[in-house]
Amino acid sequence: MNFIKKTFLTTLALMTGFVAIAQDEETAPAPTFGLSGSIDTYFRSSEYAPGTSFANLPGFAMGMANLIVSYEGEKSGFVADLVFGPRGADAVFGSPQLDDFYRSSNIVNQLYAYYNVSDSFTLTMGNFNTFLGYEVISPVANFNYTTSYMFSYGPFSHSGIKADIAAGENTSIMLAVLNTTDATEFQPIDDDYMFGAQLGIFGQYINYLGGGTAGVSQIDFTGGFNLGDSFFLGINATSYSDDTNVEFSGVALYPQYTFSDSFALGARFEAFSEDGLGAIGDISGNGDNTSFTITGSYTSGNFIFKPEIRIDSASDKFYTDADGATDSLSAFLVAAIYSF
């Protein structure tokens, strides 16, 4: 009887185990393959533009085509983000130059693999867009179509390894070891590695980037608050310095009001100051700039239509227009964006 009992219990245990494995296989999420992206094009009324990134070409102009391929498994995955067109070429400016006419043979905006060590700990290695700042390269994720000075002269991308840690329900930590800023394909300077860190609390982020042979130190705050059911206020502030005596700092407010499911109106008020950067003033001197941008955003399905007016005012006649040196620039712009 003991033998029969043991055989029965063993068989029952095996059957239970097989059922549990089958249930785990049924409940485990299936790997997913993703394909997404966007295209954008625009018209700019003036050939004269401030020294910020993107949307600086006159008349009817191209932005970029963006194609994102991703694969997500149970524990790991990858993202390959490809960009084509003027905006894309500017985004990967730190890649090796192919010749004097075509800036870069690299069309890779992001290329990274990740591994979920646990539900609260993810390791990512490769090339990924920066964690600093309010704005991003893709126009789909920005409310304003033109970009700020803080975004334009902060980092675009990093190559390295980072750890993302969920420290609580509303708290996150990111730590990273990175190549020279915007050196996307390899490390061009020996021992020029940098350190990145981010602390997120209730949707507000304090970011730090430092180190390298230039002695970089940049502290950045990015966040925002819902001030009602339809009103959101975004905030970005940054301060940069290095051992080559380059300094810049700025602050920007991004008020946005949603009128309906299809239409919203937003603005950007930015004050920016630099010394030795050459973004506004002479590279040996310094300059200050304030800019006001107001943007409408009409959405219909995957299509986004953005009319925009931007006015820049500098502390001296640092800009150039049809009449020569000037301390202000303005332009009307309309952009068409389609995402999928």
Image: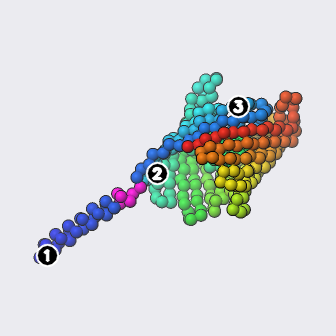
Q: Quadrant of residue 256?
A: bottom right
> Which amino acid lies under the numbered mark 2 shown in the image of this protein?
Tyr
Where residue 203 appears, as percent x and y from the top left, is: 64, 59
Q: Where does label 3 land, which residue?
A: 60
Sequence-first tag of 1 and 2: 1
C-alpha separation, residue under disc 2 versus residue under disc 3: 43 Å
Quick check: is 26 in the magenta stretch? Answer: yes
Quick check: is 223 in the magenta stretch? Answer: no
Q: Quadrant of residue 152?
A: top right
> Which amino acid lies under the numbered mark 1 shown in the image of this protein?
Asn
- Label 1 residue SS: helix
Q: Where does label 1 land, which residue?
A: 2
Above or below residue 99? Residue 142 is below
Neighbourhood count class around disc 3 (C-alpha, 10 Å): few under 14, some 14–19, many 20 upward:
few
Residue for point 48% across, 60% down: 119
Where residue 250 appears, as percent x and y from the top left, is: 76, 49
Q: Which tag is nearer the camera, tag 3 or tag 1?
A: 3
**Which region of the structure is painted magenta?**
24-29
Q: Where does label 2 land, which residue?
A: 115
Above or below residue 18? Residue 289 is above
Residue for point 18% across, 71% down: 8
Above or below residue 44? Residue 233 is below
Quarter holding the N terminus is bottom left
259 relative to 7 in the view: left or right = right
- Label 3 residue SS: strand
C-alpha separation, residue under disc 1 versus residue under disc 2: 48 Å
Sequence-first tag of 3 and 1: 1
Neighbourhood count class around disc 1 (C-alpha, 10 Å): few under 14, some 14–19, many 20 upward:
few
